[in-house]
Image (cartoon, helix red, strand yellow):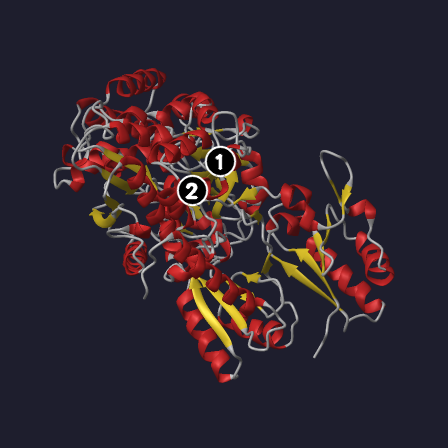
C-alpha cells in the first residue's frame, strides 16, 4: 500500500476509487455485475447474517451469476434482521429484510435473475447527507 | 421472463397492515388481473416506510408516486387512472404541509423523511473493513483539510460554531471541551474515545464502531491536532469483540496509508491510537472513572474539578469524547458548521442516534434531527406499539433517565426539554412500554441495575440506593405503606444531592419520574395492594371461572408446578399456595376461563 503523503494524494486516490464505483454501478458498463451487501454487525450476525452471506456466495457461484457479496455495518432495521441490499446494474439498490436461506433463494431466482420484485422490501426511510 | 413496466409497492409494516393494507394489495391484484396486466404490473408488499401516520401507503415505481391514506376501495381508482390511463390520482397524493400542494414525486418528499443520518452516514453503506470505501465517501478529507488549510484554533472555532454537544449524555459543548485542553500546558496530552456503552438497551456506539470505525479514528486525529495531543486511546468494553476487531483492522489500515503515525499528510503532525479494554462496569462510562480504569486503578470516579481537560490520564490534559460525538466531527468539517447548525433546535444542534427498543414494532437504530417529537419517533419511525396495545411510557437516558408519559409525546427531543420533563438525553437508549408494564417494577429494575453497578466509594450511592431498592421491593410485594412513598421521595433527593458522581446523582431519576408521572400506580400498590398492570407476582391471583372452564386439561398439562387440579371435562382449580404466578395457564387457555386479579 502506498502512503498518502498529502491532501492531493488523498484527492487523487478518492477520485480513482469513486470512478471505479461509478463505473461498477452504471448499467452501460458491460463489466457491471450484481452487488450484494449483507448487514453484518453483531446483531445481524446473531440473526444469521453469516449463513446468508455464505449461502448467497455459494448459490450465485453455482448458478454462474457474476456477483460481489460484501459485508457492511448495521442498516438500522433491527426488527428485520438479517437484512441485505441488492444492487443490480443500472438500478437503485433495494433492501430486503428477514432474509433466511429460503428468501435468499427467492431473491436470486426472482429479483436477480428475472428482475421481479419480491415481498418484504424495506423502503429507505431516512435522508442522507450526500450532495 | 416477465418484464414488468410498473411496480405497485404496498406497505406491509405493522401499522399499515392493521389499516387493511393486505386488503389493498388483494384489491390491486384483482384490478390488475381484470385489466389483463399481470405481465406488465407487479404488486408487492414492502416493509415499513417510516410514515405510519399517513398509512396505508402505496408507492408506484418507476415514477415514484407516493399515495397516502389509501383505502381498499381506492385500488380500483389507482389501477384505472394511474396504471391504465397514466394519470396520477391527485386525491391520494401527499400534501406538502407548508404549501398544501400535492407532491407527486416521492423524491421531492425526502425533506419530509423523519430521519437524517449524519453519525450513521456510512453504517450499512460501506464495508467497515475496507478503508478505500471510506475514502471514496470523503473519508479522511476532513483531517486533510484541517491539517493543510486550518489552524487548530480555526477548527475549534468551527466546532464551537456548529453548536455540537457531547452525545454521551451530558451535553457539554464539544468545541469548548477541546479548547480547554488545547489551552492546558503540558508535555503530553491525550485524546480518549469513550466507547464504554453501558445503558441497558443501548447499542448506538457499538453499531457505529462496527459499521464505520474510520470516522471515529479520523475524528480522534482531528481532535489530536486541535488539542496538541499525539496519543489517542479508545476505551472499549471487552464485550464488544466485533467492534474491537473492526477497530483494530481500521487502525492497521490507516497506519498503512500513513493516516496514523508520523508525518501525517506530509505535515509535522503525528498521531496514533491504541485500544484499552474495559471489563464492562457501568460507572467507567463516567470520564474520571474511565481514566482511572485505563491507568490500571479501580474504576472509581473522583471529584471534579480538576476536569480531565486540565488533569486527566496520568495527570495530563485529556479530552474524553463519546463515539457518536466523534463520528459527526468529519461531517462538521466537510460540510461546514453552518450545515450542522441548521439542523436541530435552538440549544441542541444536529442529529441524535437512538436505539429504539421495547414494546415497539420497528425495533431499530435511528437518527433524527434534534427537536423531533417522541410521537414521531415512536409512532412514525417506530411503527407504534406492538400488538396494538396502548402506549404507556417511554424511558430515555437509561438508569439515569426517567419515564415519560403520554403528555410528553409532543415534546421536541433535545437536551434541555428532556431534563425539564424529568428525564434526560443520556446516550440514546429509548425503551417503549405498553399498558402491561408495571411502573413500580420498571423503577425497581433500574435500581437493581444501579445497585449492581455502584462502585461503592460514596455512602449515599452505596447505601442509599440499597435502601431505595428495599422500599421498592416491599411495595411490589404488597407490603408498602403510604409513608414509604414519602420516604422514597426524600431519600431520592438526598442521594441526588450528595452523591459523588453522575451515577449516584442520577440513579433516583427512574423512581422520581415514575412517582411524578405514575403516582396512582404506586398508590394502588400501597393502598389497595394491587398491581394495575398485573406484573407484581405477589399481588396477583389467578383463578379459573367454573362457568367458562370446559375441562380441556390444557392448563393442567402446562402448569410447571402442578398447582392445577381437576377431572377431564369438569372445571379445574388453581391452588394458590402452590401457584408461582407464571401466567402459563392464562396464556394457554382457549376459553378465556383463567382470570387475573
Q: Secondary structure at mark 1?
A: loop
Q: Do we see residue B355 in this rendering?
A: no
Q: Determine whether, in the image, residue B175 is placed left or right of residue B595.
A: left
Which residue is most to the left? B297
* Residue holding disc 2: B328
B199 and B170: which is toward the camera: B170
Q: Residues within 10 Å of mark 1 (few under 14, many from 20)?
A: many
Q: Is residue B245 above or below residue B377?
A: below
In the displayed structure, B10 sits above or below B280; it is below
* Contact flag, marks 1 and 2 (Cβ < 8 Å): yes
Q: Residue at x 81, y 61 (%)?
A: B83
Q: Which residue is mark 1?
A: B350
Mark 2 Cα-neighbour bin, 10 Å: few <14, some 14–19, many ≥20? many
Residue B143 rendering spot, x and y as whole percentages: 37, 46
User: Rounded to the nearest whole Å, what is the CA distance between mark 1 and mark 2?
Assistant: 9 Å
Residue at horizontal 69 percent and vertical 47 percent from the top: B108
Q: Position of residue B376 (x, y in %)?
A: 58, 37
In this orientation, which residue lies closer to the viewer: B25 or B108?
B108
- Is B67 positioned to the left or the right of A52 in the image? right
From the top left corner, tell me how far across and down residue B289 is, in percent: 20, 34
Secondary structure at numbered mark 2: helix
Amino acid at each position: 500500500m502506498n502512503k498518502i503523503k498529502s491532501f492531493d494524494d488523498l484527492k487523487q486516490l478518492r477520485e480513482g476509487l469513486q470512478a471505479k464505483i461509478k463505473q461498477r454501478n452504471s448499467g452501460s458498463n458491460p463489466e457491471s455485475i450484481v452487488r450484494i451487501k449483507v448487514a453484518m454487525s453483531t446483531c445481524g450476525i446473531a440473526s444469521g447474517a453469516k449463513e446468508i452471506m455464505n449461502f448467497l456466495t455459494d448459490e450465485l457461484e453455482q448458478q454462474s451469476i457474476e456477483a460481489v457479496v460484501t459485508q457492511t455495518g448495521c442498516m438500522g432495521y433491527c426488527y428485520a434482521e438479517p437484512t441485505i441490499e441488492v444492487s443490480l446494474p443500472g438500478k437503485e439498490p433495494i433492501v430486503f429484510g428477514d432474509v433466511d436461506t429460503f428468501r435468499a433463494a427467492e431473491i436470486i431466482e426472482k429479483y436477480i435473475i428475472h428482475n421481479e420484485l419480491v415481498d418484504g422490501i424495506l423502503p429507505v426511510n431516512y435522508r442522507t447527507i450526500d450532495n | 421472463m416477465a418484464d414488468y413496466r410498473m411496480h405497485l409497492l404496498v406497505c406491509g409494516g405493522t401499522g399499515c397492515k392493521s389499516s387493511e393494507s393486505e386488503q389493498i394489495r388483494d384489491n390491486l391484484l384483482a384490478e390488475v388481473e381484470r385489466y389483463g396486466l399481470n405481465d406488465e404490473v407487479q404488486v408487492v408488499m414492502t416493509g415499513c416506510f417510516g410514515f405510519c401516520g399517513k398509512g396505508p401507503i402505496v408507492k408506484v415505481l418507476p415514477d415514484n408516486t407516493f399515495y397516502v391514506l389509501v383505502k381498499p376501495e381506492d385500488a380500483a381508482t389507482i389501477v384505472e387512472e394511474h396504471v391504465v390511463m397514466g394519470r396520477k390520482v391527485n386525491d391520494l397524493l401527499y400534501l406538502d404541509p407548508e404549501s398544501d400542494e400535492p407532491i407527486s414525486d416521492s423524491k421531492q418528499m425526502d425533506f419530509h423523511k423523519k430521519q437524517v443520518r449524519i453519525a450513521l452516514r456510512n453504517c450499512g453503506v460501506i464495508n467497515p473493513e475496507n478503508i478505500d470505501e471510506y475514502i471514496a465517501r470523503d473519508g479522511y478529507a476532513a483531517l486533510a483539510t484541517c491539517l493543510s488549510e486550518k489552524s487548530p484554533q480555526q477548527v475549534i472555532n468551527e466546532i464551537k460554531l456548529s453548536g455540537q454537544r457531547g452525545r454521551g449524555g451530558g451535553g457539554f459543548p464539544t468545541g469548548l471541551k477541546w479548547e480547554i485542553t488545547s489551552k492546558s500546558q503540558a508535555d503530553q496530552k491525550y485524546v480518549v474515545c469513550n466507547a464504554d456503552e453501558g445503558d441497558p438497551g443501548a447499542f448506538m456506539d457499538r453499531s457505529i464502531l462496527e459499521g464505520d470505525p474510520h470516522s471515529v479514528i479520523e475524528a480522534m486525529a482531528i481532535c489530536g491536532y486541535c488539542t496538541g495531543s499525539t496519543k489517542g486511546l479508545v476505551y472499549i468494553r471487552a464485550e464488544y469483540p466485533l467492534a474491537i476487531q473492526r477497530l483494530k483492522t481500521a487502525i492497521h489500515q490507516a497506519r498503512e496509508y500513513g493516516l496514523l503515525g508520523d508525518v501525517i499528510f506530509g505535515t509535522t503532525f503525528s498521531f496514533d491510537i491504541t485500544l484499552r479494554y474495559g471489563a464492562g462496569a457501568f460507572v467507567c462510562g463516567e470520564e474520571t472513572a474511565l481514566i482511572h480504569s485505563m491507568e490500571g486503578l479501580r474504576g472509581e470516579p473522583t471529584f471534579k474539578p480538576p476536569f480531565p481537560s486540565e488533569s486527566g490520564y496520568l495527570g495530563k490534559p485529556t479530552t474524553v469524547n463519546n463515539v457518536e460525538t466523534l463520528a459527526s466531527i468529519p461531517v462538521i468539517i466537510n460540510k461546514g458548521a453552518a450545515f450542522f447548525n441548521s439542523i436541530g433546535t435552538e440549544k441542541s444542534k444536529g442529529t441524535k442516534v437512538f436505539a429504539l427498543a421495547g414494546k415497539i414494532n420497528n425495533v431499530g437504530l435511528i437518527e433524527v434531527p434534534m427537536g423531533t417529537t417522541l410521537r414521531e419517533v415512536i409512532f412514525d419511525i417506530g411503527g407504534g406499539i406492538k400488538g396494538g396495545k396502548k402506549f404507556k411510557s417511554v424511558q430515555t437516558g437509561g438508569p439515569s433517565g426517567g419515564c415519560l408519559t403520554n403528555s410528553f409525546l409532543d415534546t421536541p427531543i433535545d437536551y434541555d426539554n428532556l431534563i425539564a420533563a424529568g428525564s434526560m438525553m443520556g446516550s440514546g437508549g429509548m425503551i417503549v412500554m405498553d399498558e402491561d408494564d408495571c411502573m413500580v417494577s420498571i423503577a425497581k429494575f433500574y435500581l437493581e441495575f444501579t445497585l449492581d453497578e455502584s462502585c461503592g466509594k460514596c455512602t449515599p450511592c452505596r447505601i442509599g440506593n440499597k435502601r431505595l431498592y428495599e422500599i421498592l421491593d416491599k411495595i411490589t410485594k404488597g407490603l408498602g405503606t403510604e409513608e414509604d412513598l414519602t420516604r422514597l421521595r426524600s431519600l431520592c433527593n438526598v442521594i441526588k444531592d450528595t452523591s459523588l458522581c453522575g451515577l449516584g446523582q442520577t440513579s433516583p431519576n427512574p423512581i422520581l419520574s415514575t412517582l411524578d408521572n405514575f403516582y396512582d400506580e404506586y398508590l394502588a400498590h400501597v393502598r389497595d395492594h394491587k398491581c394495575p398492570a398485573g406484573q407484581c407476582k405477589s399481588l396477583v391471583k389467578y383463578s379459573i371461572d367454573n362457568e367458562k372452564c370446559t375441562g380441556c386439561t390444557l392448563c393442567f398439562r402446562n402448569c410447571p408446578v402442578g398447582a392445577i387440579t381437576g377431572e377431564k371435562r369438569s372445571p379445574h382449580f388453581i391452588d394458590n399456595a402452590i401457584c408461582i404466578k407464571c401466567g402459563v395457564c392464562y396464556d394457554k387457555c382457549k376459553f378465556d376461563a383463567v382470570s387475573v386479579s
